Amino acid sequence: MDKKRVLVKFSGEALAGEDGHGINTKILKYIAMEIKSLVDAGIEVGLVIGGGNIVRGVTAAEDGIIRRTSGDYMGMLATVINAVAMQEACEHAGMKVRVQTAIKMEQIAEPYIQRRAVRHLEKGRVVIFAAGTGNPFFTTDTAATLRAVEIGAEVIIKATKVDGVYDKDPNKYADAVKFDTISYDQALDDHIKVMDDTSIALAKDNKLPIIVCDMFKAGNLLEIVKGDYTNCTVVK
């Protein structure tokens, strides 16, 4: 097995499916089974899920009625809703799961404590990190990279709706070219939206590879942790 501890980042929008909003329980179940394949293979798994299926802070603040700080806190709370739903789906699939939040809400989840998170992972529990970094103006991409570095993950897997990074939108352009690998500097200099610039810079500083893959290709996550990068793009 190539990897022992990984952090997987899912977008909140992915949970909504074709509805575009809310939580699709069939997708929840699918993701849970993909995570279970990693756990069954002995991989320690951390998860970060966005909140865009419920509310995005930047979008909520666009017309000026809601301040950006408040919008971002709303987005953080949305990630907690998704984390609790994902916890239920993973437990239903037979896994042991803990949710840790960057904003204290003890009735719902544990507060984020790095040492406790690592201990959960060592015991074979899936840890879902919610509420972003706990600070406005930082995305869940940045939160995912930060948590990955803190828990000592060997790689961060960004599970998206496409099978990697292209030079242009493959849904719009038939001649779009997929990158097998790109450098952190190329992603930053060419504004290739693998993740936001803050998260890429943090990954670069800590030599943390980012792997972008299609979350809807069954078995993809397990292939990646085994070292098969055929259906993805590696940023390093």
Image (cartoon, rainbow, N blue to C red):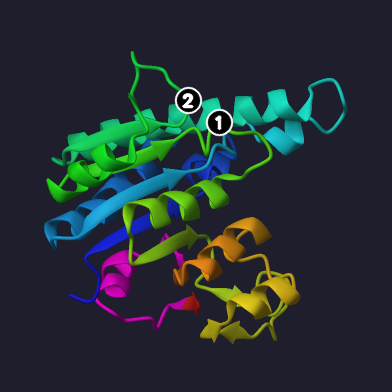
Q: Is residue 228 magenta?
A: yes
Q: Specify the quadrant of the image occupied by residue 82.
A: top left
Residue 206: numbered disc: none
220 in the magenta segment: yes
At a point 45% along the width and 72% down the height, the residue shown is: 209
Q: Which residue is mark 1?
A: 76
Badge 1 amino acid: Met
155 up-or-down from 57: above or below: below
Residue 103 is tagged as 2
Q: Residue at x 74, y 70 (%)?
A: 191
Q: CA distance from mark 1 to mark 2?
A: 9 Å
Q: Are marks 1 and 2 in contact (CB under 8 Å)?
A: yes
Which residues are the magenta region? 213-232
- Amino acid type for the residue under numbered disc 2: Ile
Q: How many marks can you see? A: 2
Q: Position of residue 224 (x, y in %)?
A: 32, 73
Residue 24 occupies quadrant: top left
